[in-house]
Image: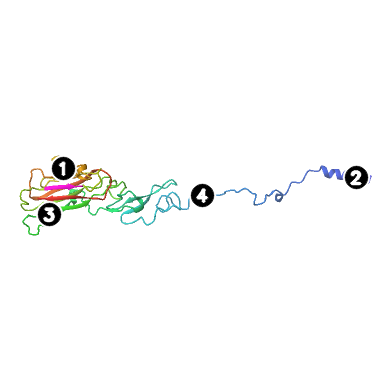
Amino acid sequence: MRAFVALASLLAGACAAPQAPVESDLALPTDLAPAVDLRGPSDLAPACTLGGPDHCGTCATVCPPGMDDDGTQRTCSGPSSFDTCGIVCKGDYYDVNGMASDGCEVLDDGMFANAAIAMPITLPNVDDPTFKTNPLNVVRALPSDARQHVVTPASRPLGLPDWYRIDAQGAGAAGTGMIACLGITGLPADNRFEVCISALNVQTFDAASCAEARGGPPEMGTGSVCVTPPGATDMGSSYFVRVQKLAGSHTANSYALFLKH
């Protein structure tokens, strides 16, 4: 009888409902647990403000330092991760060679872009014993580039024209009238420039008093041309002369303007 009771107790224990495992039994080793990113969208934002030259495209991308100077300003094309570094030109500086590595490397050393700010030039009487400024040669560059500029006009693919105000005093040289000649033989062969001269005390130009010069050696085209005022007057104040670029590649080479009365 006792044997029977012991057997019954053993069988009853085997059929009882299993106990629920404790949490520690189900935990995985820490080195096997999957990584879970609990950060929110604000936590994933870059730790800087993109779009400036010190954080362009990424927080760590700094547009070349040392480029911010009198003539060059660093830029970033926008505030996204796809944007890139660049430069714009300040003041009267130009990036003639198109290389961002040396910035806007050429300074236009005089701004005479319209009649109101024309370069003043006096041609004295030929009897002046010093004979310093009649005739007169003016040598200047008219730079241009493909960059944007901080001050207007922002785009200067042909540069800005040069204006001159000529005060012709006295009778001038015998046998000659007021004349302006432009030479650009030292400029690239694809360059085309125009020189115009006004009538006395007029700030506009007649087509007949304008002429086009072409760059390159003389055998490749008209590298030097001359114009005279309408009416062939030769004394008084003021004549206006304008030199402007019509077409061609960018250059810092100089033109020569010959003035005589």
Task: Please name the amino acid that badge 1 sits on.
Answer: Cys
Q: Tell me which segment is drawn in magenta.
A: 179-184
Label at residue 139: none
Give the Cα distance between marks 3 and 1.
Answer: 21 Å
Q: Earlier in the sequence, mark 2 or mark 4?
A: 2
Q: Which residue is mark 4?
A: 44
Is 121 on the left-hand or right-hand side of 43?
Answer: left
Label 2 Cα crowd, 10 Å radius (few <14 / some 14-19 / many 20+): few
Q: Which residue is mark 1?
A: 210
Find residue 188 and report its horizontal and vertical position in percent: 25, 46
Task: Please name the amino acid that badge 2 sits on.
Answer: Val
- Decide whether the magenta segment is chiefly helix, strand or loop: strand
Q: Nearer the viewer, residue 136 or 119?
A: 136
Label at residue 5: 2
Give the Cα distance between marks 1 and 4.
Answer: 65 Å
Task: Please name the amino acid that badge 3 sits on.
Answer: Thr
